[in-house]
Amino acid sequence: MEILKDRYTITELSERLNATDHALRYYEKEFGLIVPKDERGRRFYSPDLANIMYKIKSMRNEGLQIKAIRKILQSENAVAYPPPVVFDDISMSLVTMDSYDTSNDIKQFFNDFKEQLTLNVSAEVNSAKEQITKEIMKSKLELGACVENSVRKLETKMEKHFLEVDRSIGVWREKNKKGFFKHLFK
């Protein structure tokens, strides 16, 4: 890109690159570009930053993915390699490790990390176990109540049925009481 100015605002650069302001801010974030701001807090791009943005936009227009562009720019030293990422002991949030002092420090770091990870996983497993136990107990109580209700309904139906059978047998007996002896002595 031909540099005409010693600094561009985000709007000027987005117009020159035929990109949106949002796209430029996204590229800043994705590639770790530090864009200075003026006294009013507005971004301004130096010629070097403008050229990097131009390269990014050109490679995106050619269909390259962000990861590939990052690798290309890192190989050209146009953007910095990201610092190594490690987990903090307490909150498991991401922090960067400033330097690798010695192999013992690294071993100690990973041993501490392993212990913290083990504790965190153990706590999560125990929490999940408690929740599952509570759900099983709740389901067991609900199932027990459902079975009791079904047994009561079945007992009621059976009681009605047996009463009806008893009534029917009584009616049959009354009807056939006299007729039975008649049939024997015919």
Image: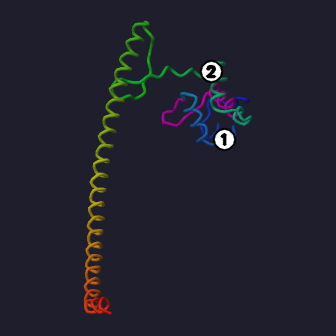
Q: Nearer the viewer, residue 98 or 79?
A: 98
Q: Nearer the viewer, residue 99 or 38?
A: 99
Q: Is residue 166 above or below residue 70?
A: below
State if disc 2 and disc 1 touch (CB < 8 Å).
no
The reply, left or right, for residue 57 in relation to residue 10 is: right
Q: Residues within 10 Å of mark 1 (few under 14, many from 20)?
A: some
In percent of width and height, residue 29 lies at: 54, 33
In reply to whether residue 51 is colored magenta, the answer given is: yes
In reply to whether residue 77 is colored magenta, the answer given is: no
In percent of width and height, residue 59 lies at: 71, 31
Q: Nearer the viewer, residue 112 or 40?
A: 112
Q: Nearer the viewer, residue 38 or 164?
A: 164
Residue 74 has which mark? 2
Q: Residue at x 72, y 33 (%)?
A: 58
In percent of width and height, residue 25 lies at: 57, 37
Question: CA gap, disc 1 to disc 2?
Answer: 22 Å
In percent of width and height, residue 140 lies at: 29, 51
Q: Residue at x 30, y 60 (%)?
A: 147
Residue 19 has which mark? 1
| Residues shaded magenta | 35-57
Q: Residues within 10 Å of mark 2 (few under 14, many from 20)?
A: some
Q: Amino acid at mark 1?
A: Ala
Residue 183, by quadrant, is bottom left
